[in-house]
C-alpha cells in the first residue's frame, strides 16, 4: 500500500490530503510550488531562511533594481552596493516578531535564519 501523501502549497498554504501525484498544480491557487510528504501534518519544526537577504531588502527599498542582478557587500573600495547592517538588523527583528507571533519557540541561527517549533501553534 502506498503512503498517503499530504501536499502543501508554498504560495497559498493550502493543505490537501491523499493527493493524486499526477496533479502538479495547487487546487487553491494554481501554483506549481508544492511539497508533499506522508508525515506533513505531523511535522512540527520549521526552518526559515530568507533567500538573498541583503539583496532582497535593497530591492524592496530600491524598486529600480528589482530586475537587476545585485550584489551587496564590499568595503571601502567596492563597486557593489554597500551593506546597511543597521537596516538588516532592524528587518531581522521585524521578521523575528512575526515568527514569535506564530510560536514563542524560535531559535535564531543567523540574521535571516531560524528554527520554529510549531508543535503548540494553532492553525489559522
Ligand atoms: Mg539566507
Image: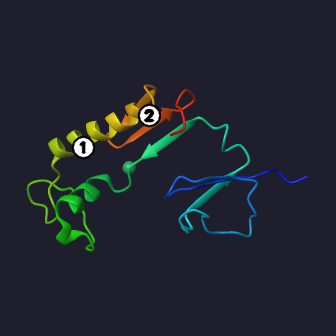
Within-10-Å neighbours for mark 1: few <14, some 14–19, many 20+: some
Q: Residue at x 24, y 63 (%)?
A: 71
Q: Percent position (x, y) of residue 61?
A: 18, 59
Residue 23 lies in quadrant: bottom right
Q: Residue at x 47, y 35 (%)?
A: 115
What's the mark number on residue 2? none
Residue situated in front as seen by the camera: 58 or 36: 36
What's the mark number on residue 102? 2
Residue 64 lies in quadrant: bottom left
Q: Percent position (x, y) of residue 28?
A: 57, 62
Pointer 1 residue: 91
The answer to whether one can see residue 108 in this image is: no
| Image vertical order of residue 43 relative to residue 65, above or below | above
- Horizontally, residue 106 falls left or right of residue 69, namely right
Q: Residue at x 19, y 67 (%)?
A: 63
Q: Percent position (x, y) of residue 78?
A: 13, 61
Of the residues tagged 2 and 1, which is closer to the observer? 2
Residue situated in front as seen by the camera: 14 or 42: 14
Amino acid at each position: 500500500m502506498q503512503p498517503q501523501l499530504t501536499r502543501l502549497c508554498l504560495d497559498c498554504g493550502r493543505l490537501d490530503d491523499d493527493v493524486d501525484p499526477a496533479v502538479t498544480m495547487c487546487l487553491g491557487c494554481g501554483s506549481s510550488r508544492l511539497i508533499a510528504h506522508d508525515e506533513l501534518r505531523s511535522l512540527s519544526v520549521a526552518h526559515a531562511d530568507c533567500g538573498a537577504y541583503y539583496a532582497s531588502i535593497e530591492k524592496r527599498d530600491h524598486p529600480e533594481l528589482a530586475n537587476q542582478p545585485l550584489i551587496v557587500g564590499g568595503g571601502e573600495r567596492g563597486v557593489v552596493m554597500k551593506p546597511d547592517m543597521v537596516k538588516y538588523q532592524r528587518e531581522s527583528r521585524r521578521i523575528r516578531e512575526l515568527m514569535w507571533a506564530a510560536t514563542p519557540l524560535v531559535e535564531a541561527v543567523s540574521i535571516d535564519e531560524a528554527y520554529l517549533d510549531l508543535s503548540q501553534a494553532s492553525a489559522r
